[in-house]
Image (tube, coloured by chain):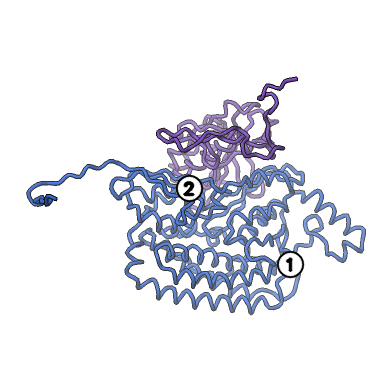
Chain colours: A purple, B blue
């Protein structure tokens, strides 16, 4: 990790820096969300920084804080050997409006990592060319790594997808195949036995 | 039947072609059972491809948030299941960085020796599988034989062949066994011998070389931009190795070379791993030579390390200490840390967030395989269908680590 990068950001983006710290020797800069892209771009293009690799990009959920999701990126310069962690926060209490600029234009590695962040936390990355779920399936309900997503939640069974010109795939009920303890719908109500 | 008589020299025959969609995987042996490629083909060349992962997603990062820090070890084991020891040590080091403790020297040499053996087994698996997928079955059996020797050694040391859960925050579960040194040297000798044989079998094999040479080339800039690390990045000519760039444990004190590739094709990635097996063997020898025969294996810190069993049953202090560590879990100070080591496939990072309680707040595993697989699209676009298999094999996608 490197103090040089922190100084560079502080001198060029003084109004955008909310805080810095160097816990356990990892220099960290906390930014305003609107400068997320420009600071990364600056670090990529500035010769003194020469940050050529986006090592990691992830999200941490703090449901009690005002901007709820912390976006965390770890940067590395292969030529200079220095590292930096950048953070910003987006999203309201309900997890809505969590939008931050995508870094795909700067690093190709951002593509899949942002897709994973969207998949797990529901944070949207504006400017991402292909923002869809990556580890989970499209019908998955909710965002599992949010703190308010119960770890033992059961996802409903997904009916077969509609495929044109294919009559082999039979649609099936929501709970079909699930053990009775896990079935959620009311058999009696469906059979019309409301008494 | 009328004879089909077309003068090819005079008339240009135009065959109607339209792009064809081909799906490979996830249940395809060459896709290692967990990745799906939907490819749009024009003739035999790939025009567009969509790589889909996630078929082995087990929600580890969520599950880590339910137990204690110690209970994360079995999960990291199952990330990269061909070199679990590297993951164990990587996670233990992240926790230790947060706690500000350093394990004793004996433990560091032991961790390095086991870690390098795990790296050898990782590379053997990748190269063996790659050769097998191209039809060379014998080298695969040779390499799996070598890998099995390593796993026998691991079983003797840890009690388990694959998922050891042997690392602990502040040390290891057990000190090295009495005959660890002789056993490790014997295994490394055998591995070197087998690697020589594999080289003789493959490096003069025209079919094998033709399938790999000049296939799946990726530029250095692209490899860096894709976040590749480890053998794949080094094959494209960047001599970046965490063990050398940011030495941890005793890597600053051992001698080893970092092989670097030239062409960044599949053959380079294959040879990179063969050479790294040799280098790892060198490191194992040095570690074994410098591993002290006696001395503590765990840090002397009652907050972190479980007391001896006879103490637990004999004294009230040790009982309480044991109870608190097991029931409440280790208390890592509130804050965040990013710790990175060189895993089998590249930089294996752990980004931990702790709120000061005994339960992890967030465990982010930075998986090198995930980013390597992200680059598959760029590697195979424009290649032939048959090249998908060696290209995919050379990236060494480990399903557990990619999907977590």
CA gap, disc 1 to disc 2?
38 Å
Characterize the local packing of mark 1: few (<14), some (14-19) or many (20 or more) Cα atoms within 10 angstroms: some
Foreground: B250 or B322?
Answer: B322
Q: Chain of mark 1?
A: B
Residue drawn at (57%, 40%) of the image: A86
Circle 1: element type: loop
Pinpoint residue A32: horizontal percent, then vertical percent: 57, 31
Foreground: B10 or B166?
Answer: B10
Q: Please determine whether, in this image, residue B14 is positioned above or below residue A156.
A: below
Quarter occupied by residue A136: top right
Q: Which residue is mark 1?
A: B174
Q: In the rendered image, is residue B249 in sight?
A: yes
- Along the horizontal axis of the image, is B103 left or right of B131? right
Pinpoint residue B245: horizontal percent, then vertical percent: 53, 59
Q: Chain of mark 2?
A: A
Q: Which residue is mark 2?
A: A53
């Amino acid at each position: 990790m490197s103090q040089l990068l922190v100084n560079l950001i502080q001198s060029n983006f003084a109004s955008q820096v909310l805080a810095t710290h160097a816990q356990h020797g990892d220099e960290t800069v906390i930014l305003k969300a609107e400068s997320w892209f420009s600071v990364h771009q600056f670090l990529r293009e500035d010769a003194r920084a020469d940050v050529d690799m986006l090592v990691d990009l992830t999200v941490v959920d703090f449901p009690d804080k005002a901007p709820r999701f912390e976006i965390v990126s770890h940067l590395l310069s292969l030529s200079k050997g220095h590292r930096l962690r950048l953070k910003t926060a987006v999203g309201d209490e309900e997890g809505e409006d969590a939008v931050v600029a995508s870094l795909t234009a700067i690093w190709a590695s951002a593509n899949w990592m942002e897709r994973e962040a969207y998949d797990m936390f529901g944070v949207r990355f504006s400017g991402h060319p292909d923002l869809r779920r990556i580890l989970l399936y499209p019908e998955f309900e909710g965002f599992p790594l949010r703190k308010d997503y119960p770890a033992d939640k059961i996802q409903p069974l997904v009916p077969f997808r509609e495929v044109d010109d294919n009559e082999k795939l039979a649609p099936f009920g929501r709970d079909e195949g699930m053990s009775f303890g896990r079935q959620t719908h009311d058999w009696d109500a469906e059979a019309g036995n409301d008494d | 039947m009328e004879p089909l008589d077309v003068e090819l020299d005079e008339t240009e025959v135009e065959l109607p072609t339209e792009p064809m969609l081909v799906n490979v995987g996830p249940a395809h042996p060459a896709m290692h059972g967990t990745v799906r490629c939907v490819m749009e083909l024009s003739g035999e060349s790939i025009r567009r491809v969509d790589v889909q992962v996630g078929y082995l997603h087990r929600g580890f990062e969520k599950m880590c948030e339910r137990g204690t820090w110690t209970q994360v070890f079995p999960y990291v084991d199952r990330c990269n299941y061909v070199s679990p020891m590297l993951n164990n040590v990587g996670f233990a080091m992240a926790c230790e960085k947060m706690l500000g403790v350093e394990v004793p020297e004996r433990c560091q040499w032991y961790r390095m020796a086991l870690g390098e053996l795990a790296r050898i087994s990782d590379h053997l698996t990748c190269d063996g599988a790659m050769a097998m997928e191209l039809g060379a079955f014998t080298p695969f059996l040779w390499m799996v034989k070598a890998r099995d020797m390593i796993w026998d050694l691991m079983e003797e040391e840890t009690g388990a062949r694959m998922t050891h859960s042997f690392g602990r925050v502040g040390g290891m579960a057990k000190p090295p066994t009495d005959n660890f040194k002789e056993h490790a040297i014997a295994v490394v000798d055998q591995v070197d011998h087998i690697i020589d044989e594999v080289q003789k079998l493959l490096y003069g094999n025209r079919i094998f070389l033709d399938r790999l040479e000049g296939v799946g080339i990726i530029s250095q800039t692209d490899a860096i931009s894709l976040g590749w690390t480890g053998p794949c990045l080094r094959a494209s000519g960047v001599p970046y190795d965490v063990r050398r760039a940011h030495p941890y444990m005793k890597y600053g004190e051992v001698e080893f070379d970092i092989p670097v590739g030239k062409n960044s094709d599949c053959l380079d990635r294959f040879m990179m791993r063969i050479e790294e097996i040799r280098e790892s063997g060198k490191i194992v020898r040095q570690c074994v030579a410098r591993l002290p025969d006696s001395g503590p294996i765990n840090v002397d810190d009652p907050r972190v390390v479980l007391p001896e069993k006879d103490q637990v049953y004999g004294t009230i202090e040790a009982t309480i200490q044991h109870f608190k560590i097991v029931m409440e879990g280790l208390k890592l100070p509130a804050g965040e840390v990013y710790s990175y080591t060189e895993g089998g496939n590249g930089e294996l990072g752990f980004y931990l967030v702790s709120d000061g309680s005994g339960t992890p707040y967030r465990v982010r595993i930075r998986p090198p395989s995930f980013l390597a697989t992200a680059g598959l699209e760029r590697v195979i676009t424009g290649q032939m269908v048959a090249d998908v298999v060696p290209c995919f094999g050379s990236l060494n996608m480990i399903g557990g680590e990619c999907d977590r």
